[in-house]
Image (spheres, grey):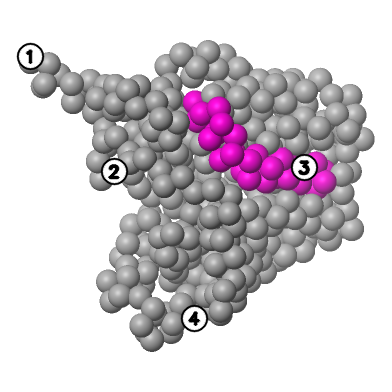
């Protein structure tokens, strides 16, 4: 076989290796993110670390606050040290932080562990997305990212089984020790993962970048324009010029409600379902079904948005999510409840993603990265607020209002993204966008 024939085949295998390594890293990310919610019913029942519902909500918010910090700083750090090193550092950080949780003797140390874990979790996902985008085969970038996102929900499924198999016989600390296991993956990641092509090009390491591009049979990315901080600040200010400030705030509010819903439900679903009278085994099965729905939703939502438009799908998905979450407050036959949990996972976990797609479609190319980044960043405050809100309701003995509160968050996001889409369509009809853009946006 000639070398010209062998290279693409070898490049395909190596590109698959990059995606596979990132998938495993995000799997561990999902495991660490969801493990707290999976073991929380047991910790509250055993009063582990003197935990109360109010404190439990605070601890859930610590991790999401750490994710906010990690997500906002990941780009700057990656630009300095490289995507590969940042991924290795993030996996190391959240694994060691889980070990800190496992040995903690009080709420303060446990909270520190969850905060540090959140920093690692928040920094890993955007970096992994950047990596797989660099090495995705031509025309398969969106599909590759969708496949990568399934790993996060696979980690959620794994967290439920870890809790189900270990927590009752061994104790809650064993679940966090399992979350230290990804440390064994760190040397593999450090040795086998190539550096990001975009990073190499940006740093002027052209020869190394060309060699990697040839080895992986991928297109070498263009050199970045090299925006300075003033350029980035100008792009942010541009989101508020004229009447754009209304549109920007609507996107931010929709993102806030969406991530409040996502992380509130992710943290409190097993505990709230136990409060509805289901046993621990059933409550953890709900976590599995919820995340299976998330995997299906990630694969379905993108295709539906291509056909009907991301804004429309996001609004409909949030409406269906709100209905599903509200129904969970009603004690139904077990089989029906399983179905509702699965369908809620389908819609909830992809509705937020469609907000980002909407923002990306509705903004100009020069401000797109800024618009999506800040929409995600503002939404992270909702991710901090959601777990805290659930804890406060349970602490006030109003756990029966938990699903209702989260459902209202879904309704609010539906309203905000719907109004934003309508305003954008009206502006576009006056000459703001081409007909093709309107067809794409739906």
Label 4 and label 3: CA atoms lie apart by 36 Å
| Residue occupied by mark 2 | 140
Residue 86 location, x and y as percent? Answer: 56, 28
Indicate which disc, 2 or 4, sits on the residue closer to the N terminus: 2
Residue 377 or residue 293, whichever sits in front: 377
Q: Is residue 302 visible?
A: yes
Q: Main secondary structure of the magenta part?
A: helix
Label 2 and label 4: CA atoms lie apart by 32 Å
> Which SS class for mark 2?
loop
Q: Is residue 351 visible?
A: no
Residue 141 in which image quadrant: top left
Mark carried by residue 62: 3
- Specify the farthest residue to the right: 50
In the rendered structure, which segment of residues is drawn in magenta?
A: 56-84
| Residue occupied by mark 4 | 423
Classify residue 46 as left or right of residue 97.
right
């Amino acid at each position: 076989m000639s070398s010209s024939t062998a290279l693409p085949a070898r490049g395909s295998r190596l590109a698959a290796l990059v995606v596979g390594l990132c998938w495993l890293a995000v799997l561990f990310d999902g495991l660490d993110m969801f493990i707290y919610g999976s073991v929380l019913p047991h910790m509250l029942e055993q009063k582990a670390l003197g935990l109360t519902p109010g404190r439990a909500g605070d601890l859930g918010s610590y991790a999401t606050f750490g994710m906010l910090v990690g997500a906002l700083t990941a780009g700057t750090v990656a630009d300095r040290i490289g995507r590969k090193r940042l991924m290795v550092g993030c996996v190391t950080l959240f694994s060691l932080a889980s070990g800190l949780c496992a040995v903690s003797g009080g709420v303060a140390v446990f909270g520190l562990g969850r905060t540090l874990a959140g920093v690692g979790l928040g920094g890993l996902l955007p970096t992994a997305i950047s990596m797989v985008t660099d090495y995705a085969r031509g025309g398969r970038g969106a599909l590759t990212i969708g496949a990568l996102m399934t790993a996060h929900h696979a980690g959620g499924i794994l967290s439920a089984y870890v809790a189900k198999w270990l927590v009752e016989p061994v104790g809650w600390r064993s679940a966090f020790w399992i979350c230290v296991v990804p440390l064994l993956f760190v040397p593999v990641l450090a040795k086998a993962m190539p550096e990001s092509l975009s990073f190499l090009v940006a740093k002027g390491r052209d020869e190394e970048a060309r060699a990697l591009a040839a080895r992986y049979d991928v297109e070498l990315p263009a050199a970045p324009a090299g925006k300075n901080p003033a350029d980035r600040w100008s792009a942010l200010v541009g989101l508020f010029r004229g009447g754009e400030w209304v549109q920007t705030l609507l996107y931010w509010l929709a993102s806030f409600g969406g991530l409040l819903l996502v992380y509130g439900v992710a943290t409190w679903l097993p505990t709230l379902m136990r409060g509805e009278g289901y046993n621990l085994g059933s409550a953890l099965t709900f976590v599995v079904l919820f995340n299976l729905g998330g995997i299906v939703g990630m694969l379905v939502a993108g295709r539906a948005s291509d056909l009907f438009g991301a804004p429309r799908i996001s609004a409909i998905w949030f409406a269906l999510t709100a209905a599903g979450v509200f129904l969970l407050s009603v004690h139904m036959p077990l089989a029906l409840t399983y179905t509702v949990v699965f369908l809620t996972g389908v819609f909830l976990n992809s509705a937020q993603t469609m907000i980002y797609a909407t923002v990306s479609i509705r903004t100009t190319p020069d401000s797109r990265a800024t618009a999506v980044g800040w929409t995600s960043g503002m939404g992270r405050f909702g991710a901090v607020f959601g777990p805290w809100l659930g804890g406060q309701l349970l602490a006030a003995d109003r756990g029966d209002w938990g699903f209702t509160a989260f459902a209202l968050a879904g309704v609010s996001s539906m309203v905000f993204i719907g109004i934003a889409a309508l305003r954008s369509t009206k502006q576009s009809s006056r000459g703001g966008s081409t007909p093709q853009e309107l067809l794409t946006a739906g």
